Every structure is written in C-alpha cells, then in structure tokens.
C-alpha cells in the first residue's frame, strides 16, 4: 500500500536519522538565534561595520571552522548540506518579497518610487544588461589572455548575468538607520529589486543557449527567449497579484455587506477574527502560488513572485483590515529575515567546510575587478542617459551615482543562481562559478556592507540635509520628475525627445493607476488615496520619527 | 567540492523535476485556498455539519478521486506523496502549539483551566492509560476470537496507545462558536492537549518493548521507560519555556533601561520595530528549538513542544509588547491552520489514491467499536473518581461527561503516530494499523465533527444557561474546585482523603505560580495579574462578546 512512505533514507534506522536531523536543525536554530541577538546588539550600539548579514556570515564561518577542527563533523555536515530544493522552494521566495520588507512604513510611500520610475527602469533593465555583458566579456577576455581560468563565452555570459544581481537588504537597512535622501533610497531600492528579475531572465536565456548550443547564437532568438522569460513571468506575477487584489476586495465588500444584514451581533467578534485569519492565509499563499504557477509554466518563479509582491503591496494590501496589514507585514518581515539570516549562515559554513580548490583565487580576484568595472559602466552610463533628459535642477547628483555604484553588494540571489549553475554546467565550470560567486558574496557583504555607513558619511548624503528628504519636502518638489512643459523645448535633439517620451511613461502610469486601477482593485477611491488615505498616519509617523 | 549539491533526484533533468514540484505544490496551494474559503463560507452560513476539517478531507477525497480517474496522475502522485520528514519536522510542530491556537483571548484566561487541573490530569493521564489498555486488550481479544485481523499483543497495545490521542481543534472551534460552559470547555481542551503527550509516551514505550521483545515484558522497566519519555520530554520542554521567559524578560527590561538613557530619540521608532522583529523571531524559534532538543536527546519532541508552548504562553507571552503578542498569536494561528488543513487534505488524498486492501474493513469496524467502549471506560470511570472527591455542588454533571465522551475525535496526532508505526512494524502490521487509523480519523472527523453542534444542543450545554459560564460567574463559584474545609470531614475513607490531597496540588500550584513563578519570569507582579493585569481588556472583551 504505502511503499512511498519508506524512503531509502528512512529504511536504515529511522530513529537515529530523525535524531541526527534534530541535532542538525538544533544547531541551525542556535546559530539563527545567535545571529539575531548579535545583529541586534551591534545595531543597538550603532556599530555599522558589522551589519546583520556579516554577523551571520561570520557565525557560519566560526561554527564551520569549529566543526572542521573537531573530527566528528561527518554527521553534522550531512545535515548542514541542506537540500537545494529546500533552498529554492522555501528560502528564496520570502527573500524576494522585498516590497513587504519595510520597517514601519518607511518606504510605504510609493511616490519617490514612481517619480523615479524612469531612472529605476533604466538602471535595472538597461544597466543590468550593460553590467552583465561587460562582466561576461571581461571575464572571457581574461580567460583568453590567460589572466584567469578560461571559461567558454556563453558560460562567461552566464556568470556575468548571475553576478549582476545585487542584494539591497544590508545597504537599505543602513540607509534606513542613518537616514538618507528619499530619491537615493528609491533608486537603490528600485534598482536592486528589478535587477534581480533581469539578471535571472538573462541567466536563463544564456543557460538555454548553452544547453542548445547547436542551434547557434541567433541574436533574434536570444532576445525572444529573454522576453519570453521576463515578460511571461512578469505578466503571470502581475496577473496573480491583481487576482489577489480582486479577491481581497470582494471579501472585504461581502464581509461588510453581511455585517450590515447580520442579526446576531454576538458572533461578530469571532467572525472578524476568522476573517482575519482567512485573509492572512490567502495573502500569504498568493505569492507562493504565483511562484509555483510560474515554475509550473516553465517561467521564472522568482521574477513572478517579485511582481506579485509589488502588485499586492500596491493594491491588495490596502483592502486588508489594519490588523491584518500589520500582521502580514510582520509575517513577511519575519520569514524573510529568518530565510536571509539562514542563507548567510549557510554561506559562511559552506566556505569553511567545503574543500575549495584555491586555484580559483586568481579567478575570484580578477572577477571582482571585472564586476567593479561593470558596475561603474552600468551606473555612470545610465545616469548619464537619465540626466540627459532630466531638467538641470533634477539631475542625479554625482554623489548619488557614487553611492549607487558603491551599493552593489551581491547576496542570496547571486548565490542561488550560482547553485543552479552547478547543475547547468556539470563539467566542473559550474563549480568554478559557484566558488567564485560565494567568495564574491562573502567579500562584498563583509567589505561593502561594513563600510556603507562610512561611505554615506564620506559622500555627505546622510541625514536630512538634502532636498526632498523624507516625504514632507518631497511633495513640494515632486521628486526629480515633474518636467515643466516650457523646459521641454530647450533641447532639440530627436533622441532626447524620444527618451523624454519614454520617461513620460512613468507619469502616465501614475495617472492610469490613480484613475482606473486603484479605484477598481482597492476599497479606496483615488481621492481618498490622495487626501484622507487611511494609512498616512502610519506612513507619516514612520517618516517623522526619523526627522 | 560540492558533491552534496547533486542529489540523485536532481541529476536527471533538474529543470523538469523542479517544474513537476511546482505543479504539485501549485495544486496543493489551490486545495488549501479552496479549503479555507469553503470552510469560511460554511461557517458564515452556520452550517456546522461540515466543519473546516471535514471540508478539507472532502476536498482531498474529491481531488484524489479526479486524479485517480485521469490516467496522468503518476507524476502528480509522486508530488502528493510528501516526505515523512516534512510532516514530522514542519507540519506537526505548529499543530501541537494548541495553547496559542486561541481566538481573541477566548481561553486566554487560565482560571477554568487551573481550577479543573485535577480533573484534567485525571482524564488525560489516568484516562488515556485506561483507554489505551482497554483498546489494546479489546483489539487483541478480537484477534484471538477471529472477529478481526489478529495482531500480536504488543502491537495491539501500540495501536491502543496511538488511537487514544484525541484532536480538539474541530470540536473546540464549534464550542467557541456556539458558546458553552467554561468548565466543559476547559475539560475538553485540557484533556485533549495533555492526552497527546501521554499517548505518544505510551506509544514510544510499547514500540521499544516491541523492538527489544527478547528482554521480556518486565512491568517495572515498562513504567520506567514511560516515565523516561514523559518526564524527560516534559522537563526539557518546561526548561526551554522558562529560558524563553527569562530571555524575553531580560530583553524587555534591558530595552526599557536603554530607552530611558537614550539621547537620540529619533532612532527609537526604528529600534522598537527591530526589537519587535527580534522578539518575534526568538519567540517563534523557541518552540522549534525545544522540539529539536528533545528529538536530539532521543525524547519526544511533540511532548516537549507542547509543554514549552504551555509555559511560554503563561510566562514568556506576557513579556512581549502588545503588538508582538498579537503578531505571535496570529502567526501560530496561521501556520497551525495551514498545517492542519494540509494534513486533512493529505489524508483525504491518501484514502482515495492509495490501494487499500479492503480486507481491513472488518478490522476498522471492530476497532471503532473498541475505541467507543474504551473512551467510555476512560471518561465515565475518571469522572466517577473526580466526582468522588468533589463536593456535591461541584460534581461534573452527566451531560458534561457525555459531551466529553462524544468529543473524542481522532486527528493529526493519531495519523502521525500511525505513519510512524509503518516504520516501526515493517512486517505489514504497520500498514494495517495505518489503514485502520486513517479510516478512523476520517470517519470520526466527518461523523463526530459534523454532529458536534447537534450533540451540544441535544445535551443542552449550549449557551449561557450554566453556572460558571464565561468568567464572570466563574470567580464567584471559583470553579468546581474550592473545597471548603468544613466539608472535608463529611466522608471518612482514607482513599478519598488521599485523592483530595492529590487534588489539592492544583491550588498549591496556583499559589506557587502566583507568588514565585509569575513575578520572577514576567514583567508583571502577582497583584497586577490579579487586579490590573494589562491583558484583561482583551480577555474580558473576548468573553463578553459571547454573552
């Protein structure tokens, strides 16, 4: 009957196995607790040189080192080597739900995000393209000139794509603690959120090219494949997000309609409670649903969950009751911090416990140089483009560009894609890429993460000295974006005109959102959103608290 | 280097595999969503014949049937057959955290629980013993007389132990919706919480006896083994619970001390937020820690997590900030309803999709008769004992005894132990026990769960007609327990005296708790707890709402 119940692992001594599992997970939980407490203590004492991610990494390094010294680690190691599936199905999805990883409404306000929409899209789509290609080409050239380990061209491009996804969590946490210009914050946040999606789609495209190498590198097919992954995942994610908004909207409506017609008020309290549990359950399941739907369709689950998160945050979230909103934010914050900390601990363990061949040191060293150059190519060229169309008083200042360039540390996403590449490139090149990526992640987290505070202070973008800082001044300036019509004719080039038109898509999206989407999908009308939005109390408070 | 990364499953076509996983999980999520919505709709329309658990079961049955009819189910089946480890490590722990599964403070009040402490302990420890032994002996006799499939005696006792654990969730949900006497509620709740612990310990003891059958059934060793499992798990669980209380206590103290001495108030908002995330993370990790610690020590993780939950609820919980309290309750409620629904769906699927040999029908039928008799032996004999020492106006009324007898439906715990027994008894008897248990769970959930509302109404224990209902009247009567000293001499038998002394342990524990434990482990003093407890607003409100 139930032969599936007897998995090969369990057959030999199920009790012992479960016990070993217990010990392994016990150690992991202890490390998690230690990381959280250490991170908290460090933050309390304003020691910004060791953010939480670095603390987790170091704990992983130390515990891994201890396990290496003691000789009994074989069984422990077996349990630290957690399954890849666990990683992709359970750890990665919550991390990608960036839009919910917000502290007390700090970036709930969508204004700086939408008003920098053009710049963010430029940086994340065009910029990530540039960074990937520059990295890939440089790594290939390095291989050709015998500077570093030689990889085939397509694999160089895969490496370029996966190493171009940046991790915002550590940098943004420090930004939030120190307080910084809202426009810079929106740029860093928006760029790192969307660039993951582009990097994944690029990586998948390159991976497909690699596996069907015979079909030739037809550039048209490449673009088509990329669009297939990116646009397909994007639309499935956005679709699920809108469905969730509709469901939560109709639930709220139906609930209030029923409440009016209810005779028995004595059950109302319990009913509200049950409804809250129900809406929280659905809200938690939907992003996961989107992830699995995209994976089932052969698309990228991570890209899909990301866009579901964005749409849900913008539309479905406001349909929830205030308690459920608090709960859902807290829930995503909790599981994403757990997952993120776990991944960093694991990376630390992995570095120490695995037998890395140190012949890769050269590769790691030169690829770091490559990604630094590629990031510069990304940021400064895109900033040049963006500034080209922006009016003179709304240009992205050089300091912000430098901060953006500096903020490109690599995290869980690059690690996940490198893990994937071990499968995709089985002839040993995957291992090289994985080792290099892990090393790059650890180094950038420790070095960049530890010095972000210093960098922000050195660039003098800390605190409330800048215009447009913290919402209040923001409404006045309306961000960088509001281009007065009279200025438009000051430059004649057609290219610039076209770019301007592209940048116009942001305000037109804003109006589409305000006039059609928000009234349709949420319980509040566009006017409410503007004037007596039920949320501003939290939003403003969160912002004021840092003034 | 990373040879662990290539698991045998992934080696052949990792992409396809992940896609299949995606489809499987997608279907599971859709069933989860469907169950939640269906359960909610049924509850809204006050259709108590199909509680949520039954709805989930039926959805599992229907989907499993559809998958059976279609021929393409092989890959789907592979993904529904989720790993046993997933069950024991991820689904079971949240379900056991009963103490947190409370709706809006309905049973937050520990008074009815503590004042019925003697009765609860009698029902759950002595009663579960009786029920297990009666079931085991009856099943053995049934086998000897060729009425049913014959199992060896020790295996009959294992079956008796595992089938004696009752599942309170469905019954208690209906109790809460209909409103019932607080003492009856406390009895049903307390009995089903603690009886799991006893059933697991008994099962483990019997399982050990079975595997070391050569050492003989020395009754002294049996008792010792049972105590080892039960008391060991209990103390490790209570220990972890107290540690969590101490940590949360010191965190709160330290935080407020720092808050006073803080110059920079501008970070306070963010700090409180981070602290909340930290304390929630720790609070969520501790029960899991306790589970893994006990498993690592070779004890029962479930028993341990149960007592950690009780201690944390009573001590650590009140140290949390109000927001964190709400969040933690919501969190445990959410994950436990997800896990519970998932298990019931899985049971429905399992019933339909597995090839059960219908030769077990006789075994199932007669074992149902056995457990009905055993439950009666448990409830009525224990109630007799309890009433023997209680003063005449505080006896457990016959109606409550009948309600308690009727409330013994079997759920996730019995299913989990039966799953375990498939490993412990590999010669095919485990399969018989598993099939019988699954069938019993499904039948009791559908029949008893569906008729609980009718039963409560038939026994006239619904609503606020009874004394001591809903807290207000409760303080006046002080539950069933306060035995006035003058009544004590009215009966002379030494046995009764001794029993009374045993029952006295409850009030003495209450005073120990009030005078020493609560002031030491929580931020509130004993007086506060009594008079201006910060929680009563929620507690009372929750109770009033149902008056």
Image (cartoon, coloured by chain):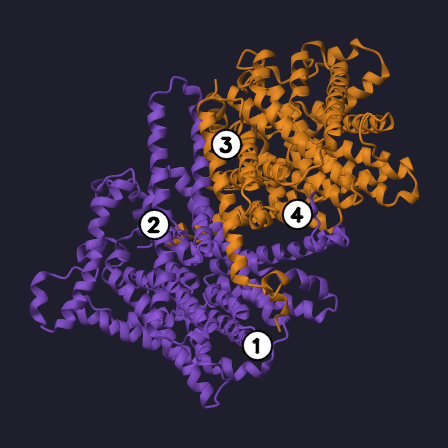
Chain colours: A orange, B purple
Per the model, the C-alpha gap separating discs 3 and 4 is 40 Å
* Residue at (62% x, 20% y) in the render: A183
Q: Earlier in the sequence, mark 3 or mark 4?
A: 4
The residue singled out by tag 3 in the image is A535
Q: Position of residue A382 (x, y in %)?
A: 76, 20
Q: Position of residue A476 (x, y in %)?
A: 58, 15
Picture disc at residue B428: 1
Q: Chain of mark 3?
A: A
Residue A342: quarter of image = top right
Q: Residues within 10 Å of mark 3 (few under 14, many from 20)?
A: some
Is B219 on the left-hand or right-hand side of A210? Answer: left
Per the model, the C-alpha gap separating discs 3 and 1 is 60 Å
Mark 3 vs mark 1: give the one in front: 1
The answer to the question of whether label 2 and label 3 lie on touching residues, with beta carbons closer than 8 A, is no
Q: Position of residue B80 (x, y in %)?
A: 64, 61
The residue singled out by tag 4 in the image is A84
Residue B253: quarter of image = top left
Q: Position of residue B351 (x, y in %)?
A: 59, 71
């Amino acid at each position: 009957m139930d032969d599936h119940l007897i998995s090969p692992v369990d057959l030999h001594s199920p009790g012992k196995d479960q016990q070993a599992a217990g010990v392994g997970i016990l150690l992991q939980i202890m490390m998690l607790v230690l990381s959280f407490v250490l991170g908290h203590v460090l933050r309390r004492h304003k020691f910004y040189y060791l953010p939480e991610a670095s603390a987790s990494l170091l704990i992983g390094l130390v515990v891994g080192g201890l396990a290496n010294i003691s000789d009994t680690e074989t069984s422990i190691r077996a349990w630290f080597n957690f399954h890849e599936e666990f990683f992709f199905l359970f750890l990665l999805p919550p991390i990608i739900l960036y839009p919910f990883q917000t502290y007390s409404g700090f970036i709930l306000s969508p204004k700086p995000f939408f008003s920098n929409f053009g710049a963010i899209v430029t940086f994340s789509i065009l910029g990530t393209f540039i960074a990937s290609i520059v990295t890939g080409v440089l790594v290939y050239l390095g291989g050709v000139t015998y500077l570093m380990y030689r990889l085939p061209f397509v694999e160089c491009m895969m490496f370029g794509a996966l190493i171009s996804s940046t991790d915002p969590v550590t940098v943004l946490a420090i930004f939030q603690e120190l307080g910084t210009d809202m426009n810079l914050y929106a740029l860093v946040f928006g760029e790192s959120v969307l660039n993951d999606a582009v990097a994944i789609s690029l990586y998948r495209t390159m991976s497909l090219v690699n596996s069907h190498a015979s079909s030739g590198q037809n550039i048209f097919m490449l673009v088509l494949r990329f669009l297939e992954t990116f646009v397909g995942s994007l639309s499935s994610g956005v679709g699920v997000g809108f469905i969730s908004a509709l469901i939560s909207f109709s639930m709220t409506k139906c609930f209030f309609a029923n409440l009016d017609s209810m005779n028995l008020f004595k059950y109302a309290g319990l009913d509200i409670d049950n409804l809250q549990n129900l809406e929280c359950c659905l809200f938690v399941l939907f992003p996961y649903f989107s992830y699995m739907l995209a994976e089932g369709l052969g698309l990228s689950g991570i890209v899909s969950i990301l866009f579901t998160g964005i749409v849900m945050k913008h539309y479905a979230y406001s349909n929830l009751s205030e308690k459920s909103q608090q709960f859902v934010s807290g829930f995503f914050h909790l599981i994403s911090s757990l997952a993120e900390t776990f991944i960093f601990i694991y990376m630390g363990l992995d570095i120490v416990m695995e037998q890395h061949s140190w012949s890769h040191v050269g590769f790691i060293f030169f690829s770091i140089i490559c990604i630094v150059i590629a990031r510069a190519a990304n940021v400064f060229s895109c900033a040049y483009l963006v500034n080209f169309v922006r009016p003179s008083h709304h240009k992205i200042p050089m300091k912000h560009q430098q901060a953006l360039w500096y903020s490109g540390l690599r995290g869980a996403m690059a690690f996940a894609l490198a893990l994937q590449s071990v499968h995709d490139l089985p002839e040993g090149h995957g291992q090289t890429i994985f080792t290099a990526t892990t090393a790059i992640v650890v180094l950038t987290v420790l070095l960049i993460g530890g010095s972000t505070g210093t960098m922000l202070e050195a660039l003098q973008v800390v605190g409330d000295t800048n215009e447009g800082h913290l919402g209040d001044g923001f409404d006045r300036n309306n961000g960088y974006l509001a281009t007065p019509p009279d200025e438009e004719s000051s430059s004649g080039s057609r290219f610039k005109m076209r770019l301007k038109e592209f940048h116009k898509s942001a305000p037109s999206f804003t109006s589409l959102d305000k006039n059609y989407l928000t009234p349709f999908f949420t319980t509040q009308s566009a006017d409410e959103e503007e004037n007596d939005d039920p949320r501003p109390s939290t939003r403003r408070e969160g912002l004021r608290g840092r003034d």
